[in-house]
Image (cartoon, rainbow, N blue to C red):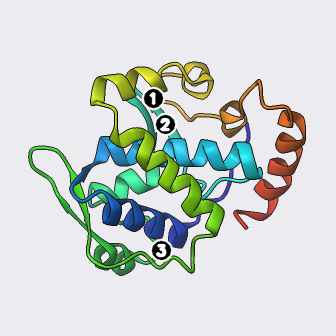
Amino acid sequence: MLRFQFDEKKGVEAMTYIASRWPDVTAFFAAKILFFAEKYHLNRYARPIVADTFIAMPNGPVPSTIYDFIKGRLHNAGDPEAVTKAFSVAQAPWPRVNALRDADTSVLSLSDIECLDEAIHFCRHRNFGTLSTLTHQERSWLEAPANGVMDYEAMIDDDNPGRQEIIEEAKEFAVYGVL
């Protein structure tokens, strides 16, 4: 299974970036934005943006660490204060995320921002049911056990002409972390 080391700083900035462009974004939509942004970036640049561990939940992929942050579970955060100063979450009736500051885009590459913007645009124009159905057609979700870890390699499209090269390069990135 292709896995990467989660980059907390990039994760916080990516979530802040999303929340600044989509105020009151629900945890569901934030999770799908992050999934599609990771997938786009992996397919184009052979590396993820934040490298969170995605779980195949009933309504689609969920980035486990960032979801914990959204739910206020910061016990595994290296810098909990960085999370609480970056975005806030209103929990009722569904978790909704709002940026408390501008995202530090110096932490995100231009390609990270490109893929985040593309994923925001893709998800913003779809409702809950449609987006859930679309993610259920993703090979990475289909191949994962229910409520289990999704394989980043399965996020690389089969029809991507550079698929094998992307896999090899991604494996190198996985050894050293997100660059």
Q: Secondary structure at mark 2?
A: strand
- Residue 49: percent from the left, percent from the top? 61, 58
Of residue 13 and residue 80, the one placed in the foreground of this image is: 13
Residue type for callout 1: Asn
Q: Which mark is residue 55?
A: 2
Residue at image point 71% right, 35% down: 156
User: Mark 2 or mark 1, which is nearer the start of the sequence?
Assistant: 2
**Disc 3/disc 2 C-alpha distance (Å):** 21 Å
Q: Residues within 10 Å of mark 1 (few under 14, many from 20)?
A: some
Q: Are marks 1 and 2 in contact (CB under 8 Å)?
A: yes
Q: Which mark is residue 78?
A: 3
Answer whether residue 56 is visible to the viewer in this image.
yes
- Residue 84: percent from the left, percent from the top? 29, 74
Answer whether residue 58 is visible to the viewer in this image.
no
The quarter of the picture where residue 164 lies is top right
Q: Residues within 10 Å of mark 3 (few under 14, many from 20)?
A: few
Q: Secondary structure at mark 1?
A: loop
Residue at image point 38% right, 67% down: 16
